[in-house]
Amino acid sequence: AQSVTQLDSQVPVFEEAPVELRCNYSSSVSVYLFWYVQYPNQGLQLLLKYLSGSTLVKGINGFEAEFNKSQTSFHLRKPSVHISDTAEYFCAVNDDTDKLIFGTGTRLQVFP
Amino acid sequence: KAGVTQTPRYLIKTRGQQVTLSCSPISGHRSVSWYQQTPGQGLQFLFEYFSETQRNKGNFPGRFSGRQFSNSRSEMNVSTLELGDSALYLCASSFGGTGGSYGYTFGSGTRLTVV
């Protein structure tokens, strides 16, 4: 069965510092991977996705992620965070019925 | 173009009552999925509808049901509400019959509080 593990429930970081949010997956089917962001009292917004091709995926708001098949990882990175990046981030993988399985989320807290 | 619209945004209901939530997908999207989000369980898949047919179902009791209309709008219903049903209910639409495989577009959700 497919699953997603987000290794950190919370990541505190100072403004303008780099950040990495970790995601590992388990899947027995062709892998499609996603990162979503959720601001308070909002739905989820797609940051980026990996469907195929280049393993380095660039998304919105300066985020990028790298698909690593050998390590079954899809970590999200940003070289310099802003206060407005404070939010909950979810990694997701498709399952064999085409629905998305989400991780438990990582709360990114950016401090001034 | 308009995004995914969920109504209402907030609801307060009493235990034992029933509730209906509505979702209008992005124009042209024929697949609508529903998720329940709680602090303890995270995001859990409820069901997916495509062309008015339930295509996929999660592990929720029969009190949770849904349907989709010919214009792709979807409703979900929860009968005999329990305190544990308090959650943010998210609707997501996707193009064609791919379900979530190419990514969803989410609505802002309906916050249901059961008292």
Image: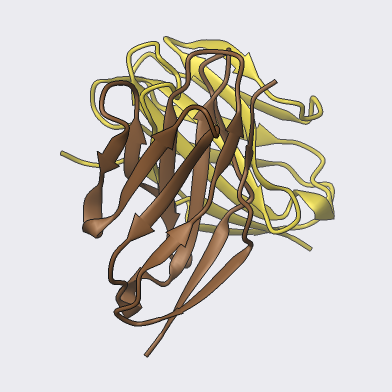
Residue A96 drawn at (x, y percent):
58, 13
Front residue of B18/B33: it is B33
Identify the chain drawn in brown. A
Residue A39: x and y in percent read 42, 64
**Residue shown at the point (63%, 32%) measured from the top left:** B45
| Residue A57 locus on image (x, y percent) | 28, 39
In the depicted structure, whether residue A111 falls above or below residue A63:
below
Residue situated furthest front in the rendering:
A70
Q: Quadrant of residue A106?
A: bottom right
User: Can the viewer see residue A42?
Assistant: no
Q: Is A58 rendered above or below residue A68?
A: below
Q: Is B6 in front, or is A44?
A: A44
Q: Is residue A102 visible?
A: yes
Q: Residue furthest left?
A: B1
Q: Split into 4 quadrants, where in the image is the N terminus of chain A?
A: top right
The hue used for chain B is yellow
Corner quadrant of residue B10: bottom right
Q: How many marks?
A: 0
Instruction: Please tell me which residue lies in front, A85 or B3.
Output: A85
Q: Is residue A103 left or right of residue B7?
A: right
- Give the residue drawn at x 29%, y 55%: A63
Q: Quadrant of the C terminus of chain A?
A: bottom left
Q: Which residue appears at 28% of the width and 32% of the height? A: B26
Residue A91 horizontal/vertical position (percent): 50, 44
Q: Is residue B43 above or below residue B88?
A: above
